[in-house]
Amino acid sequence: MTEARDTIRILGSPGRAAGATAPVIVVGLDGSPASWDAFSWAAGEAVRAGGSLLAVYVTPVVEPVAAVGVYFDYAAAEQARQDVAAELAGEAAQRAGELGVPLSFVREPGDTAHVLTSVARSAGADLVVVGRSAKLRHHVAGSLGRRLVCRHDAPVIVVVP
């Protein structure tokens, strides 16, 4: 069972037109301070290069609580994900609009590294930008930035606050 991709286009449409040279920058956005730092860096790079942003909000396919057999309200969880996506899209649109950067926002379920790579490949992205994780378990088990860099699919910038 696959959830359809939610896409919101704001201030233009990143993606390559025939012969276009403006860079497309994919940025992972989850609302954390690190992801907003990454968004700000990516927006600055888009301004400098005359490019556009594609902000990606990745949601889990399976809720961790559901895996242990406890009652879980899937409809409420989906509504909460939609609400968060709408808030992130609105804030991203405001920030990008202040800089005059074309922005698209995508909400996609799955593993974050795989989704970012897939979206970047589909958009013909020139760069993927993520924030550095502040969670201790990510430093032990492997951070998103490290997983993306090891894939060699696209240039990756990990923004460290």
Image (cartoon, rainbow, N blue to C red):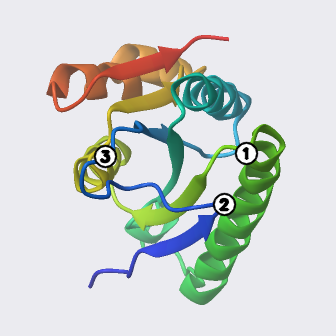
Q: Circles 1 and 2: CB distance less than 8 Å? A: yes
Q: Identify which residue, 83 or 56, lies in the foreground.
A: 56
Please provide percent x and percent y for residue 69: 43, 74
State how far apart marks 1 and 2 are (Cα): 8 Å
Around disc 1, counting alpha carbons within 10 Å, would you say few (fewer than 14), some (14 to 19), or many (20 or more)? Answer: many
* Residue 26 sits above or below residue 148 on the image: below
Q: Give the quarter of the figure containing the C terminus.
A: top right
Tell me the element at label 2.
Answer: loop
The amino acid on which the numbered mark 1 sits, given as a three-letter code, is: Ala
Q: Earlier in the sequence, mark 2 or mark 3?
A: 2
State how far apart marks 2 and 3 are (Cα): 19 Å
The amino acid on which the numbered mark 3 sits, given as a three-letter code, is: Ala
Q: Identify which residue, 111 or 130, lies in the foreground.
A: 130
User: Can you tell which mark lies on residue 139?
Assistant: none
Tell me the element at label 1.
Answer: helix
Q: Give the quarter of the figure containing the N terminus.
A: bottom left
The residue indicated by pointer 1 is: 96
The residue indicated by pointer 2 is: 11
